[in-house]
Amino acid sequence: MSAAKSVRKRKGKASLGNSARIFGLVCGLRYHGPAGYRDTALLTQLTPDWAGQQTKPRAGYVAVNLGYTFLAAAAGGYMTAWAAVANPLIHVLALALVVLLLAALSAMQARGKQPIWYALVLVVLSPVGVLAGGLVRMRVLGIL
């Protein structure tokens, strides 16, 4: 490949970079956010006694909720790394930071409705899931 073609290819990737970064973050947030809310709503609708809406959540509900929170976060991290053109790690870290902030805000809003340990685990588990999903994608790409 000639030097001129190489420069044109890099310029094309650079111009795509900003839109791809935004697209990657939006993909990750788009999957992670609605999946968590949808699954929580579905779980509480289908099993209101098990979910313990009026009282403290039961152990089974907590385990299922934590499990699919992690899986939804991991899927969001994987999709972000998949959509990233240049440096998937930067995009995954940005999504993890956004998810951490949103989870912290959610925990503050739910103060008094959930046990404190549960809220803290959700705050930590979401960005860890995003990082795990992103790292899996980078492993598939052969970057790690």
Image (cartoon, rainbow, N blue to C red):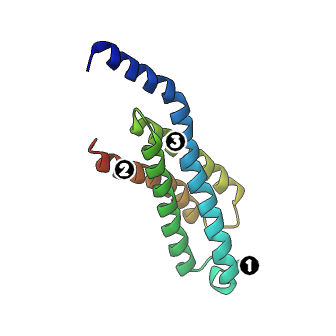
Residue designated by label 2:
137
51 lies above or below 66: below
Provide residue 57's location: percent of width, then percent of height.
62, 76
Q: Is residue 56 visible?
A: no
CA distance separating discs 2 and 1? 40 Å
105 lies above or below 85: below
Provide residue 16's location: percent of width, then percent of height.
50, 28
Single out the residue that lies furthest toward the bottom.
49
Residue at the (64%, 79%) spot, across then down: 51
Based on the displayed image, in which of its 4 quarters is residue 41 positioned? Answer: bottom right
Which circle marks residue 54 in the picture?
1
Q: Residues within 10 Å of mark 3 (few under 14, many from 20)?
A: many
Q: Amino acid at mark 1?
A: Gln
Provide residue 133's location: percent of width, then percent of height.
41, 53
Residue designated by label 3:
24
Single out the residue that lies furthest toward the right.
54
Provide residue 73's location: percent of width, then percent of height.
50, 56
Quadrant of image for the N terminus: top left
CA distance separating discs 2 and 3? 13 Å
- Viewer-nearest of discs 1 and 3: 3
Q: Residues within 10 Å of mark 2 (few under 14, many from 20)?
A: many
Name which of mark 2 and mark 3 comes first in the sequence: 3
